[in-house]
Image (cartoon, rainbow, N blue to C red):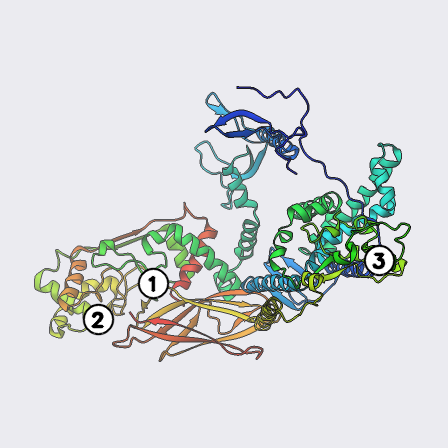
Amino acid sequence: MSSVDLTEQEPELYQARDPIHPKSIKGRFRRFKTSVLVLAYAIFFLLPWVRWERVVGPNQAVMFDIPTRRYYLFDLVIHPQDMFLLAGFLILAAWLLFFVTGMVGRAFCGYFCFQTLWTDVFMKVEQWIQGDRNKRMKLEKQRWNAEKIIKKGATVLVWTLIAFWTGFTFTAYWADAPHLFVSFFTGTAASAAYMTTGILSITTLVAAGFAREQVCIYMCPYARFQAVMFDKETLLVSYDAQRGEGAQGRKPLQKGLMTLEERHASGTGDCIDCTLCVQVCPTGIDIRDGLQLACISCGLCIDACDEIMTKRGWPTGLIRYASEQELETGKKPSLLKFRTIGYGLATLLASALLIYGVLTIKPLDFSIQQIRQPLFVVMSDGSVQNNYELKINNKEQYALELELTVQGLSNAHIAIGGNFTTLDIPPDETRNYLIHIRAPRESGVSRQLITFKLTDKTGHLPVTESTTSFNFK
Amino acid sequence: MSQSPENKKGQVETTGHVWDGDLREYNNPLPRWWLWGFYGTIIFAIVYWILYPAWPYADTYTKGVATVSFQTPVLDKEGKPVKAADGTVEMQTKTEHWNSRALFYQEMQTSPSALAQQEWLAKVKDMSFEQIAANPDTLNFANAMGHALFGDHCAACHGTGGQGVLSMNPEASYPNLTDNAWIHGGDYAKIVQDMTNGIQGNMPAFGALFKGEKLTDLAQYVLSLSHQPGVNEEAANRGKASFATCAGCHGANGMGNQMIGAPNLTDKIWDFVDVPGAPTIEGKLKLVEGVIDHGLQHQMPKFADRLTPEQIRLLAVYVRQLGGT
């Protein structure tokens, strides 16, 4: 049995990540990405501070209140009973994602995903403090001198501030924002607020500052199953290899290969191998290698290539949104394909159901349960009494004055525990009542169905009914 | 990122173990993050040992430095809680090493639901029974609290819903609290008094006084009071004279007397023998005769020692609501 000699050489315990320093680039995809970023940040960071007047509940436009189990979305208040709407929303989001992916590839990854948005901002900070790609790469190789420590330290400091504010903003969705702000910095907020902010700050800092493209490549499940939604007609960020490589492959600009005519004559492709498309890529890949897992479809390489092509006065689109089929046969993708129609219909259906669900939220939950211990009681005059547990949940922002009546039982006497005649339910509250129904015994009848009716005296709501049974014996 | 199993020389380093002729075990280095994780668990364990009970030694164990504090009653030399003049139990803060029982006590005193309960208790403390019952929220609180207490202290005899037990055997019967007959009176003060002090329900045995025909005639009369079908009017008339003995408690007209807990015999409610459940008049007669012959001995224990006055008050509200008002 030979033992392993560990002294021979220190084995490598792990492979370190090579930091990627993308070059900044201008162009239409960059502009689109920036607009989405500004819009998304504006919504995310400002929404918790929008005030909204409510009769009952917090005066915050959007708030997810866990202790009272209410989700406040402007004038919509979601109660636990309506939580299926959340499931509906998630289903809609999934179908929409499939629909978009089937049509234009990983548009979510490249333009909307928070990993992409925050990484973008963190890279901007890096560029602002440390300079563009070349300077950053130089700094990376540099020894740890004062300049490197100051620049790297300043970057991490700004990142940390952004990450903290991100974490705090997220927390502000779950509590009254101004109040949280004060209590958070005076040390009196709930421990859950500190934990949430802390965890979100750390994960934001790590994911957007250090892990970056590794999140997309190793952690994200969506990156893994995206290919299932692709077909030959899906638009992808693609390198037109036929045009770029020609018969002889790509070659840099050199004497005799300066113009398109010269290059085409010698069979050389249009790609001048300037590698700008690689330099701008946030995940550090070469799009000319074809479709790959690490490509988040952000379109920055299109901007880069178009810039070069425009400079040379050559037609743009060497790298462009094109489907596999288009690159092979030149046939443009048709929108009316099975996947688009299928995912599209599913998206429409999910949206319709969600809208229907929101519009038909019941203003009042009303449950009446017959008490089964005892099922019936004989009273002193020989009549029979059944008891019921009535639970009324007023989900509206106004008070309800309800009247309870019973139908289907002759000579029924109705008594509400506490001798109430009107059931007053304050706005957004639940009340329980014990109901006693008494009726003379009927010979030969052991059980019959009776209907309880709740009538709103204020006239806000239609009459609600619930049928249950009355037992004579 | 995991490393390729092949080293730089293109050969795979193995542990040297070979199974089934060709199965070898790779000797790849651990990922560094895994090692960090492993060291992390060791640090975690050490911190845990310091904070919490961990190591057994001799006949005890290391207690750890983490503590839990909760309120506990001050006990006198006999181990009984010391009560202040107004009946409230004196409390003191107790700090124990971390243990789940202390955590439970703490949670029962300081968790949000415990605090909410205390808030409600404070709210109803100075309210009268009528005031509690007149507000849907306080009534609901009293009912919820009362239902829980009822389940713990009353349901063993009176049933989970207060329906009691009505049996052919008076010894095995317990009064139904959901009907509208109150043997001992149904106003709040009386209910509280009965719960606090308990009830001694006692009907003497009249077996020596009434025998044979006389006993049957009296039973016929008792059944005629509540208009039971099949009663022999003649026999009942004969038995009416004997009822004078019963009238001392049940009243001349058989309407009962709540002061001494004598049930009303003229209503349709039977508390101790299941007369409606007997299919024939003979069966019904036999049940009533049995009660007259042997009498009834029923006790309800006093709850003053087990429940606080406030708990009894809330329980009274709940019991009062069971059958409606």
Q: Would you name the residue on which mark 1 appears?
A: A374
Q: Would you name the residue on which mark 3 appears?
A: A265
In the image: residue A239, left or right of residue B322: right
**In the rendered structure, are the residues bearing label 2 and label 3 in contact, judged by CB atoms less than 8 Å apart?**
no
Picture residue at 76% right of the left edge, 45% below the top: A209
Answer whether residue B29 is visible to the viewer in this image: yes
The chain holding disc 1 is A
Residue type at the position of mark 1: Pro
Q: Are marks 3 and 1 on the same chain?
A: yes
Q: Residues within 10 Å of mark 2 (few under 14, many from 20)?
A: some
Between tags 1 and 2, which lies in front? 1
The picture places residue B315, in percent across and down from the top left corner, at: 43, 56
| Front position in the image: A409 or A106 | A106
Residue type at the position of mark 3: Ala
Q: Would you name the residue on which mark 2 appears?
A: B225
The chain holding disc 2 is B
